[in-house]
Amino acid sequence: MDPFQPILIKFVKFLLYNWPFYLLVDFSRRRQRRIFIAKPKDHGFDSKGFVSRPSIRTSHQQKVKRDLSTSTQGVVQCNLVGENGSVYIVDEKDVLDTSNIGNVESSNDVDDIEDGVTRETIVGEINDDSDDIVKKEASKLLKLQLEASLRRQEIERIAQESLSLQNKLFVYPPVVEPDQDIEVFLNRSISTLCNEPNVLIKGAFNDWRWKSFTIRLNKTHILNGDWWSCQLHIPKEAYKCKELERLAKEQVEKEEQEKEKRKMEALRVAQEEDMSQARMEIEKKKQVLQQLMKNAVKSMDNVWYIKPSEFEGRDLVRLYYNKRSGPLAQAQQVWIHGGHNNWIDKLTIVERLVKSDSKNGDWWHVDVVVPDQAVVLDWVFANGPPQNANVYDNNNREDFHAIVTKVIPDEKTWIWEEQRIYKKLQEKRRLREETIRAKVEKTACIKAETRKKTLERFLLSQKHIVFTEPLHVQAGSTTTVFYNPCNTNLNGKLEVWFKCSFNRWTHRNGPLPPQKMLATENGTYVKAFVKVPLDAYMMDFVFSEKEDGGIFDNNNTMDYHIPVLGGTVKEMPMHIVHIAVEMAPIAKVGGLGDVVTSLSRAVRDLNHNVDIILPKYDCLNLSNVKDFHYHKNYFWGGTEIKVWHGKVEGLSVFFLEPQNGFFHVGCVYGCGNDAERFGFFCHAALEFLHQNEFHPDIIHCHDWSSAPVAWLFKEHYKHHHLSKVGVVFTIHNLEFGAHFIGKAMTYTDKATTVSPTYSKEVSGNPAIAPHIHKFHGIINGIDPDIWDPYNDKFIPVSYTSKYVVEGKKAAKEALQKRLGLKKADLPLLGVISRLTHQKGIHLMKHAIYRTLERGGQVVLLGSAPDSCIQNDFVNLANQLHSQHHDRVRLCLMYDEPLSHLIYAGADFILVPSIFEPCGLTQLIAMRYGSVPIVRKTGGLCDTVFDVERDRDRAHAQGFEPNGFTFDEADVKGVDYALNRAIVTWYENRDWFNNLCKTIMEQDWSWNRPALDYLELYHAARKLT
């Protein structure tokens, strides 16, 4: 028997088991066979996987049978029915189990097939002239079997390696290519799904933004253990794969090359600018020299002359003067008052002449050193030094001018001088750029140090309830958790149980067994010990009164979370999409626009992905949008919507431009159909996410204008591929759109407002009260890049907290000079505000008069939207400027540069608001080292801690006291705070200066609020 024939038999058998197609096998040239193949229909498979058929009585088949019987001895023919009704006829002893061999021929010559066969009969022809093909196909089979074996071995190796590293998941092949099928393997036993009977994988591509999928995993028999797997196709468009990673790498290299090219181009332009400036200076010098040469001579007969007659800069020369030649003939003394180059440096030569031993005339002389840069010497003669002279010989008001003869330049000299100027300009540029680089590096260091301190403050912010030792939890270490139930809802409980896990409750080991917490030496605290695994990035815990339930302290549904440092696993970045109608600086109306931009930047800086969806107003300030380009279009509600994309402050922004004219009205607000416009925008934004298969973790909407997002999402999109998205809603201003805000509160997963105290003050509002359980206050921050005294171009001297006294002194003097105030070391009160009743304008007026009574100065900057209030302040300004012209200025306008100078130059900044949701003025003031004087309301209460009354409250928040506060909105309250501040300035200046330094070092940026928002985002996502 041919050695390949057993393999071929197995091959055909395999095909008959599994494949719905037919083929012809060409065995060899020694034997001719005809094989009729059709697939079985209704009969059961025998032990070899085939169904026997009764003989088919047709003339053609009888011919075939005769042909087979004449060409083959001892062959038993078997008729089989395939799954789709085709008939297979093969020799029983030659059943094969292998793959693709032979040439296929089909025939429809079989007629009158009995009821078991319902379709055509296929006839295969075997050609004995194909030994080479047989061997080739057998070799191919062996190769496939070897590849399958190697694949299995490789998968087993990866599985063992993954288990040793406690990795529960891997893919094969390990290097993923685009347009490829891969297999995903999960070890259920070491995952949180260890007890689940069904395992599914839910995912998407391109940072969850494209093509979501859900696939069921099945128990795999390739591997030992509790391994489950599924097949997954990687589409061409997926960018996290090797080919596109290569393209991304090439893109990075291309960007680096472009960066280097831009750098070289900038260098070339700078060199050309410096060379051009050098040429301009040379031309100017030539013109000056020509002008000077018109009046300059080497001597004047019988008046003056110089020895030696040829000289240059730095030479010592003797100038002779005939006193009888002019008005000094009767003078007792003769003095020279001189300079050079048309008096460019004013008076630089003052010497007394002495009488010469000349026989002819009354000659006097003086020795003079020629200035280094002199081309022409300029002088007059007088009867005394500058302060005493009263008679001059000034050459009939034209002065005397002498050529410095040796420096009259030729063309070669001019070329040399041009190169010298060019090199000097280049050196100045180099020093300037080095200074800028050093400043950038120092700014980065300051920011990094500030972030570090803010993280520590974040960890200590709840020390009165919970903290750890050590403060910074390290992966692989044992840490102690301390808990004070006296300050929680577990106060008075007999036992406290600690329930903990890691990685936002998703760690592969699941929750740790509950621990009964132990007493400590400090009777109010209890403690528990936790072994932190190496693959932890977050420690998560709650407390309860019982091991198996009872009352829980879960931090008001947020749970407690502490970052873990040094872990082998990093937290996956979240994807947050803001849907808003304002964004600074391109579409800023109020504080909402600042929050959208600054919060997004801060969250992005924590390595999360942020997109913003904004209407494309026709009044957008596109000069602040980089790489602005048309992206695509889509249709919704019968309207075409064009989508544009660009970068604002480094943030990804999608601009929606519906072709119905809703946002071609020249403004953001103020149209009669604002609710309709913004409602359409909200629905269009969600449709954009849906049609483009975005998969954000969080959708964040703001105020009444994008409040519809909350209910439209839940009603129309929650049950689509956006099912795992959490919704967060922020209230910036409760004065507008109460109905919209109330409805959004009903549907949103989490809601915030702009400070903790303000959230309590409005908790009784009908729009909020029913949903208080999901309502949180998070203080706003300021942008440290905009408000930065170290890099502020609007103040005279840059300064940090180390040089706050010197910096603020220079700023105060510049402010006094600019506004025409008396230059004096007096306490200066600044007020920067919109002039409205909400801002406490009656208290502002009182504070102005009180400060003037105490000998201080006052600067107010602001304007009123109400014309009556504006006119009232105009009259007040006229009165005060008349009575105290050198100590008070009311600047009733908007002036951004002046506001920076006031923040830097003032000693105090007053914010006497009747109510204040957050307030940024006091935060900016502290950034510049100006001490805030505020009324204790809303965000002012949360950020300003009185130096006498709020020490404990400040320490609980990780701060030192930082200002002066008052409670009641009346003049007594203002006097209480203002008098204490002014007395401190007068009587304890060193302490006051140290207070300025302290408040400058406090971080009121978005660093801390961003951490709080991330915790809220995780809590919202957990609710989906």
Image (cartoon, helix red, strand yellow):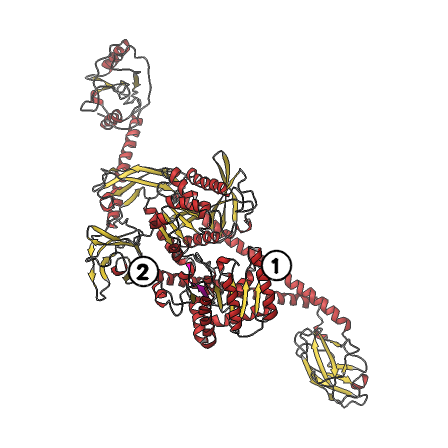
Answer left or right for 310 relative to 595.
right
Which quarter of the figure has residue 947? bottom left
Q: Position of residue 694 (x, y in %)?
A: 41, 41
The residue carrying mark 2 is 462
Q: Position of residue 828 (x, y in %)?
A: 52, 70
The residue carrying mark 1 is 272
Q: Which of the two residues, 1018 or 424, is positioned nearer the viewer here?
A: 1018
CB of mark 2 within 8 Å of CB of mark 1? Answer: no
Residue extent of the magenta highlight: 932-937
Tell me the SS state at disc 1: helix
Specify whether residue 233 is in view. yes
Which-is-in-front pick, marks 2 and 1? 2
- Where 314 falls versus 133 (above or below)? below
Looking at the rendered structure, the kind of residue marked 2 is Gln
Q: Position of residue 328 (x, y in %)?
A: 78, 85
Quadrant location, the C terminus: top left
Tell me the SS state at disc 2: loop
**Per the image, is 481 magenta?**
no
